[in-house]
Image (tube, helix red, strand yellow):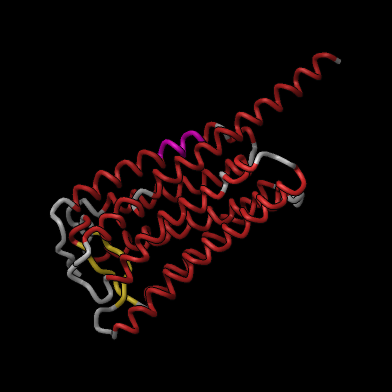
């Protein structure tokens, strides 16, 4: 499937992808340096960063001559789909973790993260491999010859919409819905019981907002291209590239800020505990 859009799209995709790779790599290093704090949120942030790192790497591989051909194309496509889904899974796990911790059902953090990794690996891999039965791997030349999983061009438009809905729309909307529910319950509980500032609690909805920025442009563009293969709306492709392929950058910004806050609060608690011990 060749999308002959604007000539600047491959270069734009390259800049966005490299920036996302650097951001997710930096986030991974920072998380590894602060694992001694033992925060479950930091471990989940590390999972998001590692998933985004692999996703960015799969996008970079598409720029290597010959990598988007044959069996290597299958590897690239599976890496792209699996890592993207895994990142979403960690984002949802973060929302559930915040909710459970806030209402007093504080899970064993390391055990919870281990369960997330095991279940997420199996679920996302199963979802990725299941797509093989619905579509084929194709090359999109205008965004760097990326290999990605898509529908078979020989099926009807209705079939194409069904394929998009099964493996893209439903999982994406489920992730957004679960995250919104968890953060809403967290926000409502804190307002009713803890009496904290609304702004401090409301900012957690920023995580879901960033998820929407990453998911919705690509979802809309993919649905639009079912019947408009000549890329009549090139601005949709631009939004798709700029926002969806910036997953590593956007997640690093919002979760990096949250991690910074967690580390600061934990350090203050440790320092106050040390001070009390010294006065005894």
**Residue name at image x 37 percent, y 63 percent:** 78
Q: Main secondary structure of the magenta part?
A: helix
Residue at (61, 60) in percent of width and height: 181
- 77 in relation to 51, above or below: below
Judged left or right of residue 78, residue 115 is right
Residue 203 in percent (x, y) is at 56, 44
* Above or below 144: residue 158: below
The percent position of residue 204, horizontal first and vertical second, equals 57, 46
Q: Quadrant of residue 275?
A: top right
Q: Residue 231, how many percent across, how many down? A: 20, 66
Q: Is residue 106 something one can see in this rendering?
A: no
Is residue 45 covered in magenta?
no
- Closest to the observer, 87 or 170: 170
Q: Residue furthest top?
A: 279
Name the image quarter holding residue 151.
Answer: bottom left
The quarter of the displayed image where residue 268 is located:
top right
Q: The N terminus is located in which quarter?
A: bottom left
| Residue located 29% across and 46% down the image | 16
Image check: 56 left or right of 3? right
Q: Is residue 49 above or below residue 171?
A: above
The answer to whether residue 35 is visible is yes
Q: Residue at x 55, y 63 (%)?
A: 177
208 shown above or below 162: above
**Quadrant of the frame with the C terminus:** top right
What are the residue bounds of the magenta stretch?
A: 25-31
């Amino acid at each position: 499937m060749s999308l002959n859009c604007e000539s600047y799209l491959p270069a734009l995709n390259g800049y966005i992808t490299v920036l996302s790779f650097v951001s997710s790599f930096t986030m991974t290093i920072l998380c590894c340096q602060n694992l001694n704090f033992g925060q479950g949120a930091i471990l989940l942030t590390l999972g998001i960063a590692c998933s985004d790192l692999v996703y960015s790497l799969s996008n970079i591989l598409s720029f290597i001559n010959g990598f988007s051909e044959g069996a290597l194309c299958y590897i690239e496509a599976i890496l792209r789909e699996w890592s993207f889904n895994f990142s979403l899974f960690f984002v949802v796990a973060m929302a559930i973790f915040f909710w459970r911790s806030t209402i007093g059902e504080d899970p064993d953090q390391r055990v919870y993260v281990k369960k997330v990794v095991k279940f997420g690996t199996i679920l996302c891999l199963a979802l990725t491999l299941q797509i093989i039965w619905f579509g084929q791997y194709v090359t999109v030349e205008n965004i760097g010859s990326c290999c990605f999983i898509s529908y078979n061009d020989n099926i009807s438009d209705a079939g194409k919409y069904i394929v998009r809905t099964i493996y893209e729309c439903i999982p994406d909307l489920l992730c957004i819905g679960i995250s919104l529910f968890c953060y809403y319950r967290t926000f409502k509980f804190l307002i009713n019981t803890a009496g904290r500032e609304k702004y401090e609690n409301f900012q957690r909805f920023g995580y879901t907002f960033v998820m929407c920025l990453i998911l919705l442009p690509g979802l809309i563009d993919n649905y639009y291209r079912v019947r408009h293969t000549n890329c009549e709306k090139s601005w949709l492709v631009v939004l798709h590239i700029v926002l969806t392929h910036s997953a590593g950058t956007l997640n690093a910004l919002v979760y990096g800020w949250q991690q910074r806050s967690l580390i600061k609060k934990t350090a203050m608690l440790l320092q106050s505990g040390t001070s009390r011990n010294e006065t005894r």
